[in-house]
Structure formats: C-alpha cells, structure tokens
Image: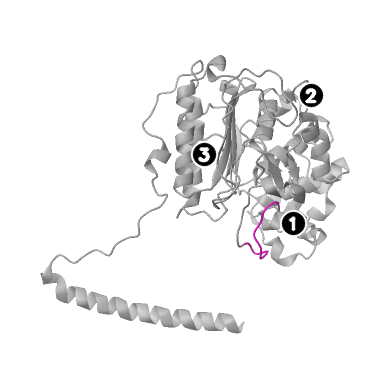
Amino acid sequence: MLRVILTALTVTRAGDGLPVKPPADVGMSGNRLGAIERVVERGIKAGGYPGASVVVGRKGVAVYEKGFGKLSWSDNSTPVDAQRTIYDIASLSKVVGTTTAIMILYDEKKIGLDDPVVNYIPTFGGGDKDKVTIRMLLTHTSGLPAGRDVWRIAQTPLEARALVLGTSLEGRPGAQYIYSDLGADVLGLLVEVVSGEPLDKFLERRVFEPLGMNETMYRPADSLKYRIAPTEVTPPRGYPLRGEVHDENAYALGGVAGHAGLFSTAADLSVFAQMMLNGGEYNGVQIISKPTVELFTLRAFGHRALGWDTADGDYGSGRYLGPTAYGHTGFTGTSMWIDPERQMFVILLTNRVHAARALRPAKVISDVRADLSDAAVLSVLDGPEVARGGKFRADREVGWNPAPRRAARRRHGSSRHHSIASATSKSRASSAKKSSSSKKKSASKKK
C-alpha cells in the first residue's frame, strides 16, 4: 500500500524505513508526485518488468513509498511491497556496500586514496599494475578491463579471486575511464585484507546493523525466498534464479563481491540514502564522517565521483537533479539518486531481467529511472525552480517496443529491370555470404 502521507509518523522502527509525512509538510506537491504511478505502471504494461518498488524521500521523511505490480509475471505471484519485497540490487552493491566500506577505512586512516593497491595485496602487482591506486579503482581509471568471464574458468571462489587479482590491464593507469566490475572486486578484496574480516561481515557489523537495515544482506537465507523478486529464468547455471545473485562472476566469487551480491528493500535503502544526506549519520549513529561523504560524492574524473556516479543528465538520472546530485544504477533494473541541494532522494528497484516482455527492456528501465527523478524534482515547491517540460519519456514510449520494419514497395514500373538486376546481384552476394558463413561454422565446430 502507498505510505503516502495519510499519517504523520514520527518514530522509526528498525527495518521499517523512514518516517512518513505528507509531501506538503516538506515542501512538495502530492499531485505532481502522482505522475510516478503513471510512469511506473506504463513500464509494467509495456513489459519492461513485472513489478517495482519506489521510495521518494525529502528532509528526513518518506513522502512516497509504494510497491507496483508483482514479483513475477505469474497471475498468482505476490504483489510487490516496498517494505518487504527484496531485490537483487546488482551494481548498487558497489556504492551501498563496497564504497561505503572504503569510506569507513579511509575515515579511520587505515588506507590512503593514493596508496598503490599492491601495498595491501601483493598478488595484484606487476608492471603497470604497481601504479594502480585505490583512487583509480574508485574512479574506474585503473586500466582494468570492464570485465572477464571468471565464472567460465574458476572452479572455486578462491580460484575466482586469484583470477580477478591476476587480470592484466588493458589501459594505462589513470589515463582513461573504463567502467570495471573487476576494479570494484579488487576494492572488495582490499576491504577484507585491511579490516581482517569478510566484506559481508564487515558491512553487516559497521553499516547495516547500526542503521537497522535488517533486510539488506548478501546470500539471503532460503526462508526469505518467498519475498525475493526472481531474476534470470534461463541463466548459465541452468535453473531459474531467486535469492541467488544474478551476476555470474559474483556467484563464482561465492555470492559476495565488490561489484554485486547485495539484496535489499526500497525501505532499507531509503535509510541508507538519508544517512548519506545527513552527512554520514542516522538516528544518532555516525557511520561515515561528513567530510568523507562530501569528498567521495564530488566529481573526480569526468562524471564519476569516488565509487559513486553523478547526475550528468544521463545514466537514468533525469534532467533536473542538482549539480551536486550523485547516485548509481544496477543491471537488474535498480537505481538510487541523491540530491543534497534539495535534501531529496529517489529509489527504484525492479527485476527487469526476469523474462522481460518488452522488446527493449533496457530502454524501458532507462526512461522510467529518468522520469522518476524528473517527477520528484518537479514536485519540489520550495527549492530551485525548474522549468516544466513536456510529457514524460514513459508517456511517449519511444523505442520500447518498436514495430518490425516493412520492406518498401516498388512504386515505379520503369525501374523493374533495374530492380530485378539489383535483386539478382544481392541474391548472389547473399548466397556467397551464407556459404562462407556455413564454412566458418563448420570449422568452428571442428575446433
């Protein structure tokens, strides 16, 4: 049910998310926030995802919290609940998990941003890798490739870790931006070396438990499966996924990885977002120092901050978030955007990788993410004014389910001989191409 503001709740219970207040109490328009329902429902109707959780918060309270649709496409599937439905949050793990752990260690002066990674993990070094710093890993400028099919090679999590650390650079350290899951994985391993405990245990003890984020975890128990949104139906693992991390490399690493593996609810993530807006503190508990929060969320290389991304009018952040806004997205259809200028955040969780019916589900989720941010900003009445544009992207559905192209009809009989000759030529070329392709496939099978 929509926790919008039917009551002015002032007490937060652990695991329940933020207190709820009417939008008007924090300078927002309830009518304008209503556009969110239309946007999210259109995404479901178009087949982009079976359900979604949304929370919009401002000035320490939730003003919009609602579950849409169901956990799966099945008619008898459970309806989504923003407080109880657990999603695989994919790359949001990079910021909610790994980056937060790095921030804590930086606060405690146990690491320095310009320290070479090899100082902490000797097996990572060799050649130019000796020059890779923690800062470079955070800004995706280490030179590490975007990814590697570790899951195809490793037989155990230990082997997977060795493969991650042994990956060669494909660029010069500090010279270019390559968004790299492997870099986040190295950061996760660094946290374990410096803290002396597994990444998941460190985060549970230092972040999730103190914040009352009781629904946020790696490797959720089987007893929770009934309220976890399913993801891939036919993954390489050979069985439908529900409660197991969607990302194959994260699974190969044992389900706990720097780049993926976290499961959470929208309500839990709203507490985390508010902690960030509060300068690292929530409910009397200081998780990270305010200067460290400010440092890590400033642009450091292009549109990237340290671990975090920034709202650059792209990447699903919408057009209207403030110049200091930051956040991240996740492959499974998740996003979190935080706008300090407006003291506001927007969270969206979906499982768009679960048998999406739309032809282009990536386009659907990208537009819906952006629309949610825009709708939230346009609802703020006491902040910087924003010129209201036209319809939302979801109202146009451009490229969501494009119609198949039709062959153009020949209009002029005078071009008949030319057309036949052209068609014959194309047919011959096509036949030759098919023959060549068949030979290549045959050769490939022999290998």
Q: Which residue is mark 2?
A: 285
Q: Residues within 10 Å of mark 1 (few under 14, many from 20)?
A: many
Q: Report, in whole angstroms, how far the alpha carbon at label 2 lies from the one at label 1.
A: 35 Å
- x%, y% of residue 231? 62, 53
What element does badge 1 sit on?
A: helix
Q: Amino acid at mark 1?
A: Val
Q: Residue furthest right?
A: 196
Q: Tell me where residue 244 appears, x and y as whole percent.
A: 71, 53
Indicate which disc, 1 or 3, sits on the residue closer to the N terminus: 1
Figure disc tally: 3
Q: Is residue 151 above or below residue 140?
A: below
Q: Which residues are magenta?
A: 235-243
The image quarter in which residue 160 lies? bottom right
| 206 vs 300, nearest the viewer | 206
Q: Report which residue position mark 1 lands on.
A: 164
* SS under mark 3: helix
Please indicate, yes or no, whether residue 275 appears anywhere in the rendered image: yes
> Which residue is under mark 3?
369
